[in-house]
Image: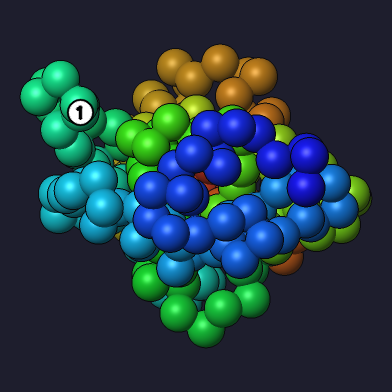
Amino acid sequence: MSDIPQPVIDVLKEIGETAKTSTWDCHGTRVILHKALEKIAAHKGIEFELPVHLVTDPANKQVAIQVIGSMQDAQGKFRAEWSIGEVSPANCKNAYPFAMAEKRAKDRVILKLAGLHGYVYSEDEAEDFKDSPHAELLAYNEAVRENIDFVFQVKEAVANEEWDMLRAIIEETPNDVKLALNRAPSKGGIFTTHEVKCMKQNPKGDN
């Protein structure tokens, strides 16, 4: 396993694990098991704040959760990292979207705090890139993460039927952002069919 980055080997050694027992190769991408990340979090004393639910749409199995974690480093200084875990039918077939979204977010935070981010992926994300055609979905999910505030504002405006607010949000948002997030719900898009319709036309009926 000469392809294993040294930082990964070192951290796994700290918890009594090896790359052979805690990682696997997913079409050229190194993936680390969730149970190994939990052991790393416990070993390094990583603590998590209460998660923040950014997108909550259980009917369409679309969830986005923000998680913040912190730890004390070797010099006694506290470090904090945050990440977002997102779930949609396109990137998760799990029947428990809330649990999976939180798991993904926590795993990413652990990877960042442990200094492993960029070297390995968590196993909960492996479903995103098992097949090379998923590259497009990965790019879409990244766009969602980068524009999660816009996503949340649109969903909140539609849910509360605040049509003037929705129109203002749409008009103020750059076209490249709207294009990046333009994906059909049936193909894993973050917006529901109703939300897409509301974004494209004025629900009040006056043009």
The scheme the figure's colours follow is rainbow
| Structural crowding at the residue carrying mark 1, measured as other residues with C-alpha within 10 Å and reported as few (<14), some (14–19) or many (≥20) | few
| Image side of residue 142 versus residue 35, left or right | right
Please state the horizontal and vertical placement of residue 156, each as a whole percent of the image: 31, 48
| Residue occupying the point 78% across, 39% down | 2
Up/down of 126 relative to 144, above or below: below
| Residue occupying the point 60% across, 32% down | 6
Q: Nearer the viewer, residue 12 or 27?
A: 12
Q: Pick out the residue farthest to the bottom.
A: 95
Please state the horizontal and vertical placement of residue 139, each as a whole percent of the image: 71, 36
Q: Nearer the viewer, residue 25 or 89?
A: 25
Residue under circle 1? Answer: 73
Please state the horizontal and vertical placement of residue 203, each as a whole percent of the image: 46, 49
| Residue occupying the point 79% across, 56% down | 26
| Local secondary structure at mark 1 | loop
Up/down of 21 relative to 109, above or below: below
| Image side of residue 112 versus residue 188, left or right | left
| Res. 119 in view | yes
Up/down of 17 relative to 204, above or below: below
Residue type (three-letter) at the residue carrying disc 1: Asp
| Image side of residue 71 versus residue 184, left or right | left
Query: Which corner quadrant of the image does residue 109 belong to?
Result: top left
Q: Nearer the viewer, residue 29 or 189?
A: 29
| Residue occupying the point 15% across, 20% down | 75
Q: Pick out the residue farthest to the left.
A: 76
Q: Nearer the viewer, residue 198 or 155?
A: 155
* Count of marks placed on residues: 1
Please state the horizontal and vertical placement of residue 191, each as a whole percent of the image: 55, 53
| Res. 101 in view | no
